[in-house]
Amino acid sequence: MNSDGIFQLKNKITFSAYCVLLIFILIYSIVLSLGPVVGGDVYFYLESGKNFIENGISLTPIDDYIFTRQNLPFELSHEWASMYGFYFFYMLGGWPLLYVVKTILVTATIYSPFLLSSRLNNNSLLIPVFSVVAIYASSFRFDFRTDLVSLILIVYLLTFIIILRRDNYKPGKWYFLLPIIFAVWVNLHPGFYIGLLVVGLSFVIDMYSYMRGENSKFKSNYISALAVFICSLFCCLLNPNGLKGFLYPMFLTVSNKAATIREYIPEWQSCLHNLDKPHIRIFILLSVIYSVALFCHAYNKLIKKTIDIDDIYVIIISIFFILIGFLGVRYIAITSFCITVIFVYIIANNERSIILTKIYKLRYLITLTSIVFISLSVNDIVDIMSKINSVTNNYHAFLSPNELADHIDKHNIDTSRMYLHYRYGAYLVWKWHGNKKVFIHSFVQDPDLFREYINAQITDDGLNYVINKYDINTIVLPPDVLKKFPIGDILKNDKKWKVIYKDFQCVMYSKVEA
């Protein structure tokens, strides 16, 4: 690893630019963390955490929050620890403390590439530039979600695996904590299986290399590493559902439920289905830039005939992360920061290469590009700050009907048979603590119910079917859904329905009594 390459901080200008970018990244990460709640997941976490504390964790949990299904299995017991944690921090310090915890998670994740660059003694100016692009591409995922836990664990696990490989698996204190980390992780979020792949792929490649007679002097290190990995696998069984809980993420990925979810929920869909969103377009650009850098790295090593098992690991794991990033919008943040971490490794191994020397000639273009992305980031900051009144009252989501819920309670409106947007359900579950059941919420994974829910918005027959089957008496949807889908015109032109409430978040229709 060279510390005096062409992109290193060898003069006051590059050092000053590096420091300015670091400060900007810190400000950007904090502001992103303080943004209002975008989705409604956190409300369901709070209500579920409250129930887990009061009633314990059932091995056969039932979703008792909806009136459209009876005895529907509750599929989130594998995240019980995260839900408990959300409610625990909420009870300790309310929304301000939740924001502090989220800020710590987001900021720590964002600074993971700089930890690796410090360990590799390679503080290149390209790293903060690449990081700014990655942050912008991922920023829409920095909401109150349990996958923030998997995000930080996956990114730091990859960081430490790269360091560990450099040290030929020389045992360290954190290394023997892996089984404990996975035992906790399996109860926090199903993203643990990505962590297992990050660790397992490294061990498989090295064991293959060892079996071929390479690196035999590190035999004891490899054996201890393999033992730790096997122990980590068994520790993943330490969840309320045992083997079923361990296999759940894999089965969900290929199940009919997953196919239905991908069909109707944007965050489960491919990036190519969401090209209208600027952050996704930037993610694709980031992936292309990284892929070019990875190709140049591999080509440079092949030409010099110096490619080794570390490079093979980096190439395979890079392909995996880019693949899942393109296949699911929900993985964009994980992919963005993982390839940023690997980008640090690539820079550290190519600082004196001819390729980077040619890239250096484009330094003015790189500078201009950096200014563009910083401007986009500043626009994000201004937009978020404009939506924040204070840390204590900015928790109302733009997709949550908080004012409507207050109106319903104040006027005692009958909502026992209310059709509503699936993202509204989680907020109302938390608001009413399950005393009033909802049509659907964002954690329901019943394929048939989702089809009924969607068909009601896109066809007259679908809407009539739902109204008749569930005796619907009120309908609540966001204004943009009413404009985008046929259900808006159907309700507007049907004299059986009338608007009884409207605000910037939602419109409420009530059935006119004959």
Image (spheres, rainbow, N blue to C red):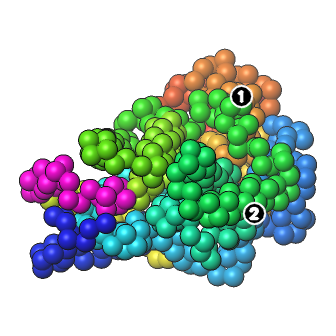
Which amino acid is tagged 2? Ala
> Which of the numbered marks, if any, corresponds to residue 256?
1
Q: Is residue 375 left or right of residue 275?
A: left
Q: Which of the marked residues, 2 or 1, is nearer the chain's N terminus?
A: 2
Camera-side residue: 236 or 371?
A: 236
Camera-side residue: 89 or 383?
A: 89
Q: Is residue 34 visible?
A: no
Tag 2 residue: 183
x and y, in percent, of residue 379 in the image: 28, 60
* Snapshot quadrant of residue 258: top right
Q: State which region is magenta.
A: 343-366
> Which of the numbered marks, if any, corresponds to residue 176?
none
Q: Is residue 466 left or right of residue 366?
A: right
Q: Secondary structure at mark 2?
A: helix
Seen at 56% across and 44% down, the residue is 212
> Mark 1 Cα within 10 Å, few/some/many (few <14, many 20+)?
some
